[in-house]
Image (cartoon, rainbow, N blue to C red):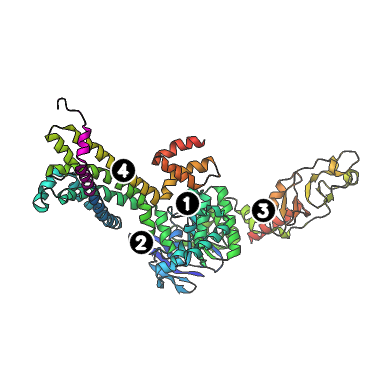
Amino acid sequence: MITFDGVTKRYPDGTVAVDELSLEAPTGEITVLVGPSGCGKTTSLRMINRMIDPSAGRILLDGADVTTVDPPTLRRGIGYVIQQAGLFPHRKIVDNVATVPYLLGWDRKKARSRAMDLLELVGLDPGLAGRYPFQLSGGQQQRVGVARALAADPPVLLMDEPFSAVDPIVRASLQDELLRLQAELNKTIVFVTHDIDEAVKLGDRVAVLRVGGRLAQLAAPAELLAEPADDFVREFLGRDRGIRRLSFIPADGLSLRTDLVVPVSADVSSVRGTAEAWLAVVDAEGGPLGWIAPKDLPDSGGTLAEVPAAPYGTFVRGRDSLRAALDATLLSPSGNALAVDGSGRVEGVVTREALGEALTRIAEDARG
Amino acid sequence: MGEEPLIRWEWIGNNGPLIRELVADNIIMALVPVLVGLLVALPLGLAAVRWRWLYQPTAGVVNVVYSLPSLAVFIVLLPITGLATRTTVMVPLAFYALAVLLPAVVDGLDSVPEHVRQSAVAMGFTPARRLLAVELPIAVPVVLAGLRVATVSSVSLVSVGALVGRGGLGHLFTDGWQRQFPTPIVVGIVLIVLLAVIADLLLVLIQRWLTPWSVARTATRRVTQGAARATARPAAQSAGQLAGQSVAGPGRGDAA
């Protein structure tokens, strides 16, 4: 656990970068520091590994004041990832990754074999090991940066806007990758970003800082979206706060209707008279095929396989959020969503009425 | 010079030992000052990067020395280092080398990107190790570029020493001039150019060998843009055959 205890950083010219900051970054969790430029988020991060020393207050790493440890020794035990990756241009990828093991005095062979393992862990082709950094794309370099930070298996990882310099698609995949790695490694991560969406996506806890280095709010993402502490935080969270909050509410609670699902092998005549406006058609394995409107069915024989089906949207029950369920209803003219299990079999239908009830309950919670 | 031909081949044949001796003298008097200049420029450059205020005055002094006419410097040095000695010639040359190399070392160290320096600090490098393992290696291409300029100019500047009786191949110029005999002059010019070109080429090879990460820089971009399967190695070799920066332009054209 990393503890900020009344930490202040004041520069000789009188500028206060961080003002009486107290917060905890719990072990094994991702704590995100987010805020506009000038809010002291990077300064705070750099005080953890003593790239900057505080003017007042203490920073404790598992209870021990970091200023009692010699900086190089302290830093070798803390992984660090920065925006431009900061790779050494004159060293091959494998040696870049093995940097800290080399510093710790591991023998070359062991350090390199560890580096190869890490390249694989972060999803890089081992064939890149012998290349130089400039030969890699920005996204690949950033992965190498993460691998390098993890090389000596430090319990703590500091990440300073690590994904800001890559394009949005690569950024999203790097974020997913980080979450996947974190599920496996359980590091204590402090992550700095100016992007609130990134903060909300990655953080177990999000600390919003305001200019001048004051903590505005520290909360879990769902709570932050539901109950911003003040106007500054509300404004910083930006638009669509209500919709985005749905990402943190599981779709499990939605009521399912199984009576609206029909197999594709059913006869047209058997469903034509149904009172329902829409029915979901599934194949023999239970996979979704689409929606049909019984009143529009042709007056002919044969099975539903001969009838054109309207588009559908699905969400995975037990994994996806209410936001995904809402999205699924908007993808079909039926206005209903299909709930599927992990292997894609339809479990039932969430009607727009069912979704509406769930949304109403959430809105009522927000009022209280 | 009347009927005298530009070159008399038999003179070369008859003066083999003299020419060899002058070549050796020229090489020594050219390279020792560059080496000394580099050895002085490194610590001075490091200090100037560490304490910025030091750079301007140091560079100022070096530049003033650089601007002094070499003949004047020779005359000042004569009573101390003696007539026709190597030292008399090499002292000003060392200052000239220093004048080129000091900015090269400072620019080289400045060429280390801030994020690379920061990440080295954050990885837990001690300052000394960071300098040796990260900053100096990254400064090498810029320092070597300065070293090439210093070496080539030093090789040709040696000949000025002929004015005080020790000019390496420059001796052939005064000799030919005094006797109105062009052959030694032509031989001197050709050999000096040859020495300069060879020295430059050797430095280019050293640079390719020391900084494969910088050599490949221009070529591999072309390769990765063109064929995805191409590896770094052949790219580096082809870059070695072509000249430095010019690779990027036509290379891209080839790939497309």
Q: Amino acid at mark 4?
A: Ile
Q: Are marks 2 and 3 on the same chain?
A: yes
Q: Residue furthest left?
A: B79
Secondary structure of residue under mark 1: helix
Q: Residue B114 appears at what percent x and percent y?
A: 39, 54
* Front residue of A294 and A61: A61
Q: CA distance from mark 1 to mark 3?
A: 39 Å
Q: Are marks 4 and 2 on the same chain?
A: no
Q: Amino acid at mark 2?
A: Tyr
Q: Which residue is mark 3?
A: A323
Q: Is residue A216 visible?
A: no
Q: Which residue is mark 4?
A: B198
Q: Which residue is mark 2?
A: A11
Observer-side mark, 1 or 4, equals 4
> Quick check: is B147 in the magenta stretch?
no
* Front residue of B87 and A99: B87
Q: Is residue B76 left or right of residue A191?
A: left
- Residue at coordinates 34% horizontally, 60% vertically from top-left? A14
* Front residue of A75 and A97: A97
> Quick check: is B7 in the magenta stretch?
yes
